[in-house]
Image (cartoon, grey):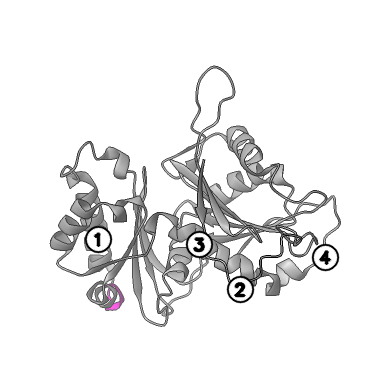
């Protein structure tokens, strides 16, 4: 397991302080479950938990999330319980902010919510991963923004714009391809990923009768995911698109950091303020 520390604010070093808030209203958790890595951020802990998305129900290893889809709900639940069950405050029910892929979002949310129930969440708020990435990058969302998220097994290209508000919130258009960094066998062999991204953006340009996509591309696409850590890929992708690319700082953890920002302000959300009986589970909410 990898622990990614986050900068602390303030100079207090009083070790008598509790490591996390203990009240039911303050307990919170941000989750980003990818095909290769699962990352979590617990309110008050100041670090990102980063582990492989894998579980061991028997003699062999099982990968419960594949190509951006939850294929094994019980396996996903076991993984979450092993990672977080002992880390959450006892006798509390956390508010969970969960990143989701834009496409196939309803199916993913339903299966992911079932798996997350192992943590006894008070409320589950969902946010498109592209939106979380934009928040982590402090992007100006008053203008169209193209987000290219290249993960280990899945690549998404999402156009965020305030021009049209769809059910996912600010998503104007989206494409996905079942390729990622694990499909690159060696440095310099990133042709499949580059072709997939170029094809998706070209398709978006052709189908967009307005200038939203073209404006976002000229402004510069926001690059995130593990693919943004590969200089050979980003260099060749810039040449293929004939447009600038802007990599998010620490691109592999951008989605979880954006989800953490939402969690920090989520208690103002109407669904989070609602009082629920301790034994009642609530459905997912789009944030």
How many neighbours does mark 2 have within 10 angstroms: few (below 14), some (14-19), or many (20 or more)? Answer: few
Q: Residue at x 68, y 72 (%)?
A: 269
Tell me whether the residue at label 3 lies in contact with that at label 4, contact meaning CB atoms closer than 8 angstroms.
Answer: no
**Is 211 one of the magenta-colored residues?**
yes
Q: Earlier in the sequence, mark 4 or mark 2?
A: 2
Q: CA distance from mark 3 to mark 1?
A: 30 Å
Q: Residue at x 82, y 65 (%)?
A: 275
Disc number lying in front (3 or 1): 3
- Residue topped by disc 2: 10
* Residue denoted by label 1: 203
Q: Would residue 219 be visible to someone looking at this image? A: yes
Determine whether label 2 and label 1 are within 8 Å by CB.
no
Residue at left 25%, top 55%?
Answer: 197
In the picture, the disc for residue 257 is 3
Quadrant position of residue 25 = bottom right
Residue 275 — which label? 4
Please report contact status of discs 3 and 2: CB closer than 8 Å, yes or no. Answer: no
Which mark identifies residue 110? none
Q: CA distance from mark 4 to mark 2?
A: 32 Å
Q: Is residue 72 magenta?
A: no
First in sequence: mark 3 vs mark 4:
3
Instruction: Measure the C-alpha gap from mark 2 to mark 1.
Output: 48 Å
Q: Nearer the viewer, residue 243 or 21?
A: 21
Q: Tell me the mark number nearer the camera, choosing from 2 and 1.
A: 2
Q: x and y percent of residue 257 in the render?
A: 50, 62
Distance Cα–Cα, label 1 vs label 4: 45 Å
Query: Of the residues tagged 3 and 4, which is closer to the observer?
Result: 3
Magenta stretch: dominant secondary structure? loop
Residue 101 in picture, x, y percent from top left = 46, 54
SS at mark 4 in the image: loop
Of the numbered discs 3 and 1, the one sitting upstream in the chain is 1
């Amino acid at each position: 397991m990898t622990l990614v520390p986050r900068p602390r604010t303030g100079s207090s070093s009083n070790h008598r302080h509790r490591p996390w808030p203990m009240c039911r209203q303050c307990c919170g958790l941000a989750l980003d479950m990818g095909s290769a890595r699962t990352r979590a951020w617990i309110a008050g802990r100041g670090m990102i938990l980063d582990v492989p998305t894998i579980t061991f129900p028997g003699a062999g290893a099982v990968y419960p999330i594949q190509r951006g889809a939850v294929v094994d709900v019980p396996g996903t639940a076991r993984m979450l319980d092993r990672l977080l069950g002992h880390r959450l405050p006892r006798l509390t029910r956390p508010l969970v902010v969960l990143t989701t892929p834009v496409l196939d979002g309803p199916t993913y949310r339903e299966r992911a919510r079932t798996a997350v129930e192992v943590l006894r969440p008070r409320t589950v708020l969902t946010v498109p991963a592209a939106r979380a990435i934009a928040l982590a990058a402090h992007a100006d969302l008053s203008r169209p923004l193209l987000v290219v998220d290249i993960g280990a097994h899945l690549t998404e290209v999402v156009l965020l714009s305030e021009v049209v508000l769809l059910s996912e919130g600010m998503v104007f258009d989206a494409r996905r391809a079942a390729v990622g960094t694990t499909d690159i066998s060696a440095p310099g062999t990133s042709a499949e990923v580059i072709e997939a991204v170029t094809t998706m953006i070209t398709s978006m340009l052709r189908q967009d009768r307005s200038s939203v996509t073209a404006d976002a591309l000229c402004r510069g696409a926001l690059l995130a995911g593990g693919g943004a850590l590969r200089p050979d890929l980003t260099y060749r992708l810039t040449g293929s698109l004939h447009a600038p690319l802007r990599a998010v700082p620490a691109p592999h953890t951008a989605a979880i950091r954006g989800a953490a920002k939402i969690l920090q302000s989520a208690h103002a959300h109407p669904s989070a303020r609602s009082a629920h009986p301790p034994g009642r589970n609530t459905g997912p909410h789009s944030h």
